[in-house]
Image (tube, rainbow, N blue to C red):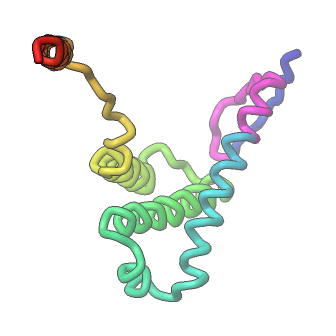
Amino acid sequence: MDKKESARPTGGQKDLVLEIKKDDYVEILKNLNSSIKEFQTNFGLLKTHYSLKDLEKVLNPVQYADYNSFLAYAICSIFHSYLKISGNFLINHPIKNELKKIQSLMNEIKEKNPENNEDKRSLTINKEASKRIIDSCISYNKDLKKRKYFK
């Protein structure tokens, strides 16, 4: 069953009608739960290490860049949420550009992360080379058997 909700935002915008299915609620909750867990683990590092200089000593450069981009995204998204709740127009607000910049930076860091690249690599077998190796082993074994019988 579809549930229709009507929301009237401030600022003279037209009426919005949101259609949300029950399955969508489950998906939204799963995404929210994973985001909250990531938020807790990342801010847990600040709890144990009180300054970013301490974190720089603990994390490798890729993790440190990823962590800093996470902090920047968290701060900008909280500010974006604040502006949205207070009813400001966000159509041409600079915070949207900042969020896009940070998202592209985060994607770039993920692409350059060697841990992620190792997972994407798959092993390929060179059939010709493997056939040559197997044939040479088999022929070598046949030669050994022939020598054994003639001695």
Q: Residue at x 80, y 30 (%)?
A: 6
Query: Left or right: where does residue 53 sit relative to residue 25?
Result: left
Q: Quadrant of the C terminus?
A: top left
Q: Quadrant of residue 120?
A: top left
- Between 27 and 140, which is closer to the camera in this rendering? 140
Q: Please name the residue shown 69% across and 47% down the image.
A: 32
Q: x and y percent of residue 68 in the render?
A: 40, 68
Q: Residue at x 75, y 27 (%)?
A: 24
Q: Is residue 136 magenta?
A: no
Please say if 115 is above or below 41: above
Where is residue 37 shown, x and y percent of the image? 67, 57
Region in magenta: 10-29
Please state if 50 lies on the left or on the right of 68 as rendered: right
Which corner quadrant of the image does residue 7 belong to?
A: top right
Q: Is residue 64 visible?
A: yes
Residue toward you, 37 or 105? 37
Q: Quadrant of the N terminus?
A: top right
Residue positioned 39% across, 39% down in the render:
119
**Location of residue 13 in the rendering, given as x and y in whole percent from the top left corner:** 63, 36
- Nearer to me, 50 or 62: 62
